[in-house]
Image: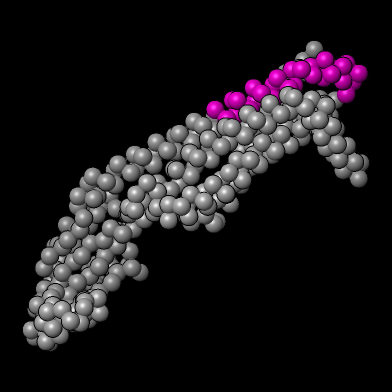
Amino acid sequence: MKAIRIFFRNVASAIKSIFRNFSLSVASIICTTITLVIVAIAIILSANISNFTNDLEETLTIIAYVDKSADEDDISAIKSKLLEIKNIKGDELVYKSKEDIKNETLAETDENSSLYSIMKTWNEETNPLQSEFIITVKDVESLGETANTIKKIDGIKNVQYSASVVEKMIPVFKVVKKISICIIIGLICVTVFLICNTIKLTIYARKNEIEIMRLVGISNFVIKLPFAIEGLFLGIIGSIIPIVVTIWGYTVAYDKLEGYLFTNFIKMMKPLPFTIYVSLILLLIGAVVGMFGSYTTVRRHLKI
């Protein structure tokens, strides 16, 4: 019970200190707000680019066309060999017979078109289409190597995949993803530096108060605790506006841009629960940095 009373007494002391040093507290809050808004923008852009890259990788598939002379046993043997390839996602392996492909095409074709009339007359013998396996891989960077392995399987007539996308776009987006992560880490470091230095000004203005408490015999922990709690509150308050801007701004942008970023090629992540995760990250950064900055700064003034 005593520990709880001490804790709440320190919380009350921290709140009073915020209002007693109002101008410096406001400066800390403004600094936290500005830097966290920049961090939020960087996280949102990075997350959307990363999500787009992942979606693009998942849509890249290999189409393996089966020889027309293959029967059911041959197809079963081909499927078994495909499942033995480590880079292939076995649970996403799809087989489509030429009859399945014909029916799917007919369903998407205008019934009044000449193509529809021609395809309608095809039967098992006259159908010129080829049965195929649609293959999804685990590692997109090994797509070409996997395609070459599939070509060697008996019964596979031809293999097709988006080689140009793999060779050109994927490496670019991977570099962009790494750069975005580096930018976010850099911004967080800048945030830590700016917030800590702003809090240092607040602590420095009260160094005499700290030294007096130290001289009268108050323990270091008791002196540091109210300042750490104060820094925690300042960080939390400073993260409120960035959180509101993140949730409201991203939702409005998502609606205005109709779910696409810059171009219809890059699909944005849905606002929920994405903005909630970003908000929690901002709250955590603000709280931890505020508390850490206050705690480490006040420690320097305990050395008399």
Q: Visible in this render: residue 100?
A: no
* x and y, in percent, of residue 243 in the image: 61, 44
Query: Which of the pair 118/58 is nearer the observer?
Result: 118
- Determine the residue positioned at 68% across, 28% down: 28
Q: Is residue 277 left or right of residue 235?
A: left
Q: Nearer the viewer, residue 30 or 158?
A: 30
Number of on-image labels: 0
Specify the principal SS of the magenta part: helix
Q: Position of residue 39 (x, y in %)?
A: 53, 37
Q: Is residue 179 left or right of residue 117?
A: right
Q: Quadrant of the N terminus?
A: top right
**Residue 202 belongs to magenta span:** yes
Write the residue at 44% across / 34% down: 182
Seen in the image, is 243 located left or right of residue 229? left
- Can residue 130 be seen from the camera position used here? yes
Q: Please report the residue visible at 13 percent of the width from the left and 83 percent of the height from the top.
A: 117
State the residue in front, 230 or 261. Answer: 261
30 lies above or below 4? above
On the image, the x and y values in percent for residue 298 come to 74, 22
Q: Which residues are magenta?
A: 190-218
Residue at figure coordinates x 29%, y 62% from the top left: 136
Instruction: Give the answer, above or below, for where 71 lies relative to 175.
Output: below
Scheme of colours in the image:
one colour
Residue 214 x, y percent position in the rendering: 85, 19
**In which quadrant will I find the C terminus?**
top right
Quadrant of the rendered structure where residue 92 is?
Answer: bottom left
Residue 200 belongs to magenta span: yes
The image quadrant of residue 131 is: bottom left
